[in-house]
Image (spheres, helix red, strand yellow):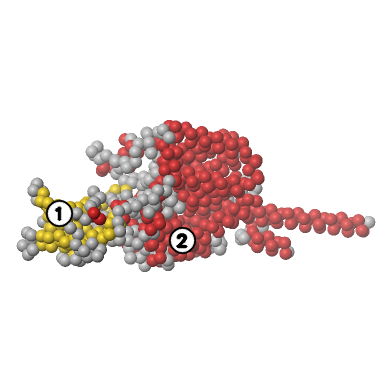
């Protein structure tokens, strides 16, 4: 009795009493089709392929850093978000139906506590956000609203709840395979400069009927021909996508007993690596590398059994990298090298203040204070210039007869690279300040100075807090140094709830015009931090990030311990290992990539399937132990009967 109790405790699963020992085939293939996995089929097979142009309202026209336009176009994000929320709604209905209509006891595990906490904090963050409307509807260039975040958590639990047999996993992996093949065809067409979306078929596919009928409506592509972006909005996310799913197909190749199936899965794996090469995503290389390292650690000495397959894969990878690098005239390795270079940069212009009585320019280690004065008639003017010690700065005025403006050149050697100009802008007097050949336009409205930004709006200058060490290395990691330097200071204000889901655009200092110019993002709207962990911490709070990390680390540790000892002759075990390594690669990519609706649903569904697989393996292990105990008890009983018979004789 004590042995049986120990088995139950250590298995960490619930075995229904009516199952008995005759139901130990529950984790094996066979039986009727499980209709509850259909929502997962939609996400794994159809969701990544959704592309369609949609005109969406921005609701950002009231913000100074955004243009006056209240409409923009989206192809890759909006409909994916709608589709995902719809599927998740169906999942929720099915869970409720199971619980209340069919009176089925819902499985639970302690592992879901931090996940539930993460979802709860995300919802609270949306409710109490200053930008709640964006949190509940999503924002342009992202569309990852609170409903999407709640859907992520729901996907994990739904997968764990309804994926209960090996047959379910086999069906899901088959659908996943087909969906990935379609993605590969798109990626290869892009890699070899035959982008399907730039064809007439692609135009028909992407444009609504009313727009497609007009031949004047053309699609403009941001990325050059030959760059792989799949259906993922940006080439950067190709790296996260491949890091996430490629280990699954590599493990399926190792698990297939039929040679042709193994070859097909290896071809898919190699095709995915080609997509990374075509996208130029350095994050993808890093993610795949770490997933392979984890794979080696999981297999340990038992990797020897798969040496032939491993050697084939290694040779193919090296050959593809070498070939593609030559095909791109060495650009592949050159871009990888550039990404690792960390160059320190210094900027002469530090900040600009727009005060009521002056404009203060912080240049090198000095300040230049400028004020514009007009007489009552508005015809005569004067410009005062002072330094940080309120000492007058001399300048030489010059009339530009052609434009009717006045130019001023400073004679102070501290400010020789600063020139200013007086003119009228839309009937109002303004002055341009040319700093290191860059124009900054200021205007005095209602007794206060404003900056006229590139959107033509009069705004106050914002000099946001930043991490100085990172700011000096702003171009590190493809410009992420600058972004992170302005994002990290936001964390101290967002410990509990954050600014709200999908609100990073509004939380980030897009109105720090000097910093944006120095960072090389003057005419770019910063909508994401290019770091999934900073994204979570800012938007839903540092506490929610901790919950998210606890959930994944818990899954990672329990899975690693399980698969190190698992029987790798079973295909379901290989799928579980592939999911573990893929999600780990995705988490590594998260250091330099964001959570995006184009990929994240796959990550969360795969984790849910991974947990379901873990549960099935533990259940089978528990049955195996029970069988061993029963066999031992039977043997012992037979032995006692034999001894008794011999004694009688």
Residue 545 disc label: 2
Question: How many numbered marks does the figure carry?
Answer: 2
Residue 214 at x, y = what percent?
24, 39
**Residue extending furthest toward the left:** 377
Q: What residue lies at 65% left-to-right and 60% top-to-bottom?
A: 10
Cβ atoms at labels 1 and 2 below 8 Å apart = no
Residue 309 at x, y = what percent?
59, 37
Q: What residue lies at 52% left-to-right and 61% top-to-bottom?
A: 550
For the residue pair 90 and 549, the one nearer the viewer reads as: 549
Q: Is residue 363 above or below residue 192?
A: below
Nearest to viewer (mark 1 / mark 2): 1
Answer left or right for 391 relative to 8: left
Whole-number angstrom distance, CA of label 1 to CA of label 2: 57 Å
Q: Secondary structure at mark 1?
A: strand
Residue 460 at x, y = what percent?
24, 61
Q: What residue lies at 29% left-to-right and 41% top-to-bottom?
A: 220
Residue 396 disc label: 1
Q: Quadrant of the C terminus?
A: bottom right
Q: Secondary structure at mark 2?
A: helix
For the residue pair 57 and 65, the one nearer the viewer reads as: 65
């Amino acid at each position: 009795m004590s042995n049986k109790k120990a088995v139950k405790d250590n298995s960490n699963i619930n075995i229904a009493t009516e199952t008995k020992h005759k139901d130990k085939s529950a984790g094996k293939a066979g039986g009727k089709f499980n209709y509850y996995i259909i929502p997962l089929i939609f996400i794994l097979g159809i969701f990544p392929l959704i592309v369609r142009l949609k005109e969406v309202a921005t609701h950002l026209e009231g913000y100074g850093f955004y243009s006056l336009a209240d409409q923009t176009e989206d192809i890759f994000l909006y409909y994916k978000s709608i589709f995902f929320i719809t599927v998740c709604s169906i999942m929720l209905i099915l869970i409720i139906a199971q619980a209340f209509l069919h009176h089925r006891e819902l499985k639970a595990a302690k592992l879901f506590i931090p996940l539930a906490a993460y979802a709860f904090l995300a919802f609270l963050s949306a409710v109490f956000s200053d930008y709640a409307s964006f949190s509940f509807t999503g924002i342009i260039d992202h569309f990852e609203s609170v409903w999407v975040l709640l859907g992520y958590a729901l996907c994990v639990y739904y997968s764990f709840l309804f994926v209960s047999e090996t047959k379910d996993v086999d069906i899901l992996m088959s659908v996943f395979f087909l969906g990935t093949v379609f993605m590969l065809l798109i990626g290869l067409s892009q890699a070899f400069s035959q982008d399907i979306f730039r064809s007439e078929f692609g135009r028909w596919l992407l444009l609504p009927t009313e727009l497609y009928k007009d031949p004047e409506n053309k699609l403009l592509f941001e990325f050059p021909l030959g760059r792989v972006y799949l259906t993922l909005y940006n080439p950067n996310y190709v790296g996260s996508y491949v890091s996430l799913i490629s280990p699954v197909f590599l493990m399926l190749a190792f698990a297939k007993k039929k040679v042709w199936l193994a070859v097909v899965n290896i071809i898919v794996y190699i095709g995915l690596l080609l997509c990374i090469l075509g996208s130029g995503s350095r994050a993808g290389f890093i993610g795949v590398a770490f997933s392979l390292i984890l794979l080696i650690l999981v297999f340990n000495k038992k990797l020897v059994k798969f040496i032939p397959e491993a050697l084939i894969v290694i040779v193919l990878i090296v050959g593809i990298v070498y070939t593609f690098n030559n095909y791109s005239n060495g650009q592949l390795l050159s871009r990888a090298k550039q990404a690792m270079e960390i160059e320190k940069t210094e900027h002469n212009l530090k900040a600009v203040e727009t005060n009521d009585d002056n404009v203060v320019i912080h240049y090198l280690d000095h300040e230049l204070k400028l004020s514009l004065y007009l007489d009552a008639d508005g015809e005569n003017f004067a410009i005062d210039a002072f330094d940080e010690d309120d000492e007058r700065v001399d300048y030489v005025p010059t009339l530009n007869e052609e434009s009717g403006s006045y130019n001023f050149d400073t004679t102070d050697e501290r400010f020789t690279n600063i020139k200013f100009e007086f003119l009228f802008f839309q009937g109002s007097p303004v002055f341009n300040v040319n700093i290191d050949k860059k124009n900054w336009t200021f205007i005095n409205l209602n007794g206060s100075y404003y900056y006229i930004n590139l959107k033509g709006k009069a705004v106050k200058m914002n000099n946001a807090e930043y991490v100085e060490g990172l700011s000096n290395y702003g171009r590190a990691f493809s410009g992420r140094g600058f972004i992170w330097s302005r994002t990290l200071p936001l964390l101290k204000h967002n410990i509990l709830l954050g600014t709200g889901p999908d609100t990073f655009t509004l939380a980030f200092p897009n109105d720090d015009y000097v910093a944006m110019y120095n960072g090389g993002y003057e005419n770019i709207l910063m909508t994401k931090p290019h770091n999934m962990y900073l994204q979570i911490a800012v938007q839903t709070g540092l506490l929610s990030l901790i919950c998210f990390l606890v959930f994944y680390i818990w899954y990672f540790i329990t899975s690693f311990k399980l698969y190190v000892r698992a029987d790798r002759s079973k295909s379901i075990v290989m799928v579980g290992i592939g999911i573990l390594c893929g999600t780990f690669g995705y988490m590594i990519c998260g250091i330099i990539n964001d959570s995006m609706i184009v990929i994240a649903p796959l990550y969360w569904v795969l984790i849910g399937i991974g947990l379901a697989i873990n549960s099935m393996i533990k259940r089978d292990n528990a049955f195996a132990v029970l069988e061993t105990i029963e066999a031992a008890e039977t043997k012992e009983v037979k032995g006692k009967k034999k001894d008794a018979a011999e004694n009688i004789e």
